[in-house]
Image: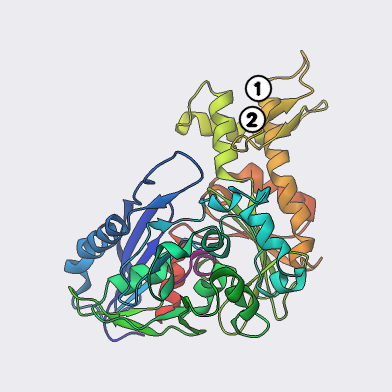
Amino acid sequence: MTSRSSLLVDVGATYVKVAVLRADENIVAESKFDFPPFLSLNGPYRTVDPAVVLAVVEGAIASVLPMADNPERILLSGQMHGWTLTDEHNVPHLPLSTFQDNRALLPRNGSSHLDELRNAQPPEIWHAAGNELRSGLPVAGIYATDLAAFDGPLRVHSLLSWVAAALTGTPAFVQHLTDAAASGMFDLKAGSWSEQITALVGGRTRLRLPQVSSTLEVVGIHRDSGATVLTPVGDQQAALLGAGLRRGVTAFNISTGGQVARLANEPAGQRCQTRPYFDGLLLHTKTHLPAGRALTRGVELLSRGRADDGAWEWANRAAAAPADHPLPRSRPTFHHADGGGWSGITDAHTAEDLMRALVIAIAAPYVDSAPDVGFHPMDELLFCGGVAQRFAPLRTEIRSALDRPANVAPDGDMALRGLAGLAR
């Protein structure tokens, strides 16, 4: 039990959430604030103003300080794969890039920055870094950035590590392992920054990389509250910890985006991504699966633009009802460039049939990905995330296909619960 209260802050892609963990270990005063909008939606860049992000986080903290009674610590989690480059005083040279940034897809030498980067190292180097190489990773965004435009050494910050540093006066340059590994430049096998990747991305002298720790370390002291700011952790890991992930459990975290994950002792190799977890464990995971965005768009289309409570009640009933005839095929890729939709629709099909087909199509990648993360026939299933917790037909479809008992994480913000677990 903590002797004083702690502040819990999750810097998500949609909201900045905050709460107070009291000395009696109860979470109170939970609230949320909108994460700032992108500076522009034109082109491939998806960035946010660092000063505006900091102001939102500071505002969230200030909103709960009266209920915190002299907090001892500030624990943070948040969206992974964000980054910026700063000087040695942590002053940003660039806006904060988010995981949705695609500058690495811009053309270069008849190809793209991303393809050039991928071909510059053998596959085993990228596998050692855990993440599948894609345009939204910091390693790709930094590679696609003209470093010659900046003078002097360049500190590489994640979005989270920069926020933590900016909350303090004289911060230590340190990252938690779950945050550092999200860069795509950390060698999980060696337990250190990858020399091959960092040399390729920024040369051997330009980039300054933080110290990496597998435990929560002190970044500095928050100016307004006097609380100790600790190194932020990845939101996926915090959420799964808060949901109750343990050995022998395959977890389906389905909210705006979707993931399948399972704890492991060794890297997964090419089967899936490997991410660090807590207490020396690794996380085998498949990410970017169809989830809340696809389901919400389907409900809107089938409810004439509605996505209110009434539309979702209809969707629950429609998807739960058994079909007595073959269903059309659905592609839940509405947000991809090629779009999504349904095919094979006949005069016999109804809107309810289309809803059932959509749920089946969304569930299929989770079922197919379970073996890749190490699903065992004796595993329990764990459903967490807002969509999985509230939309029973999707859970039923996945559970029926895997034929295993399932638990549903309790209501409440999982990342904040995970931070509370780390604080205890």
Q: Does residue 416 appear in this view?
A: no
- Residue in view at x 69 percent, y 27 percent: 354
Apparent side of residue 102 relative to residue 4 in the rendered image (left or right): right
Crowdedness of circle 1 by 10 Å Cα count: few (<14), some, many (20+)?
A: some
Circles 1 and 2: CB distance less than 8 Å? yes
- For badge 1, the amino acid type reads Ala
For badge 2, the amino acid type reads Ala
Q: Which residues are magenta?
A: 232-239
Answer with mark 1 or mark 2, whichever residue precedes in sequence: 2
The stretch drawn in magenta includes residue 349: no
Return the x and y of residue 157 as percentages of the image width and height: 43, 70
Residue 9 higher or lower than 393, as above or below: below
Q: Secondary structure at mark 2?
A: helix
Q: How dense is the environment of label 2, judged by Cα within 10 Å: few (below 14), some, or many (20 and up)?
A: some
Q: Quadrant of the C terminus?
A: bottom left
Q: Main secondary structure of the magenta part?
A: helix
Q: Is residue 238 magenta?
A: yes
The quarter of the picture where the N terminus appears is: bottom left
- Residue under label 1: 351
For the residue pair 360 and 125, the one nearer the viewer reads as: 125
Q: Is residue 302 above or below residue 260?
A: above
Residue 343 marker: none
Dividing the picture into quadrants, the one containing residue 222 is bottom left
Percent x, y of residue 228: 29, 81
Residue drawn at the location 32% of the way across and 74% of the way down: 165
Distance between the alpha carbons at the discs numbered 1 and 2: 8 Å
